[in-house]
């Protein structure tokens, strides 16, 4: 947090199936896996392109989260399905050691492209929807603390949840 590249709007990916895109996606995957992330956006590794990856099977940072299929999503577009918001704890690999209580749409529809250019269209809810919204925010220069409404519910994990590694279930 503080790096101006994280506050800029990313450019669309123009060409699929290139060695450069494959290398970027591999770097993103390795970074996310190494840090136990639920997702990662290209700007988080200094590349201003509209590409995100996400996926959760079992993750020590989100032990109670439902599974999210591993997805490469390029040039994503998100639409809320309804107006219902759901608040929940979020963290971010670009904002280490902190958590915040963030409102997100409970249900969304998202679309974009896979690494090979194939069209992806899905609906998601709950944690899956939260992860997609969080990662796609990075493409527009938005970090989750910018969405926190109550700053008594934002801070260092060890201060908010003494003696715990993660927030308790709400």
Image (spheres, helix red, strand yellow):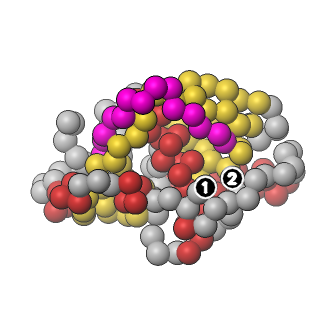
| Residue at the far left in the pictured view | 162
Quadrant where the C terminus is found in the figure: top left
86 drawn magenta: yes
Q: In the figure, is residue 36 to the left or right of 119?
A: left
Inspect this view and state whether residue 13 appears.
yes
Instruction: Name above or below for residue 128 compared with residue 166.
Output: above
The residue at 80%/31% (across/down) is 118
Residue stretch rendered in magenta on the structure: 76-89
Q: Report the disc number at residue 163.
A: none
User: Which residue is depicted at the point 51% across and 32% down?
Assistant: 80
Does the segment drawn in magenta span residue 109? no
Q: At which x and y percent is residue 44?
A: 57, 62
Q: Are marks 2 and 1 in contact (CB under 8 Å)?
A: yes
Question: Which of the pair 167/58 is nearer the observer?
Answer: 167
| Identity of the residue drawn at 42% across and 30% down | 83
Please identify the quarter of the rendering in which residue 75 is found: top right
Measure how far apart labels 2 and 1 are at the Cα level: 6 Å
Q: Position of residue 128 (x, y in %)?
A: 47, 32
Q: With 140 as the anchor, is 57 left or right in this view?
A: left
Looking at the rendered structure, the number of numbered marks drawn on it comes to 2
- Percent position of residue 25, x then y: 70, 50
Residue at disc 1, secondary structure: loop
Residue 128 appears in the picture as rendered: no
Q: Which residue is mark 2?
A: 50
Main SS type for the magenta part? strand
- Seen from the viewer's position, the closer of residues 124 and 70 is 124
Label 2 SS: loop
| Circle 1 residue | 139
What is the quadrant of the N terminus in the image? bottom left
Instruction: Determine the image quadrant of residue 78.
Output: top right
Q: Residues within 10 Å of mark 2 (few under 14, many from 20)?
A: many
68 with respect to 71 (left or right): left
């Amino acid at each position: 947090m503080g790096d101006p590249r994280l506050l800029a709007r990313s450019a669309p990916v123009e060409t699929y199936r290139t060695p450069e895109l494959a290398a970027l996606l591999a770097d993103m995957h390795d970074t996310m896996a190494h840090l136990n992330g639920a997702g990662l956006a290209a700007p988080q590794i200094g590349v201003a392109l509209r590409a995100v990856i996400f996926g959760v099977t079992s993750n020590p940072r989100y032990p109670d989260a439902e599974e999210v299929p591993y997805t490469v999503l390029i040039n994503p577009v998100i639409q809320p399905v309804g107006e219902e918001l759901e608040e929940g704890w979020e963290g971010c690999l670009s904002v280490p050691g902190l958590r915040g209580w963030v409102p997100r749409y409970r249900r969304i529809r998202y679309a974009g492209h896979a690494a090979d250019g194939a069209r992806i269209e899905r609906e998601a809810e709950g944690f899956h929807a939260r992860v997609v919204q969080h990662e796609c925010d990075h493409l527009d220069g938005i970090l989750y603390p910018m969405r926190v409404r109550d700053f008594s519910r934002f801070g260092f994990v060890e201060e908010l949840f003494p003696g715990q590694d993660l927030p308790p279930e709400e």
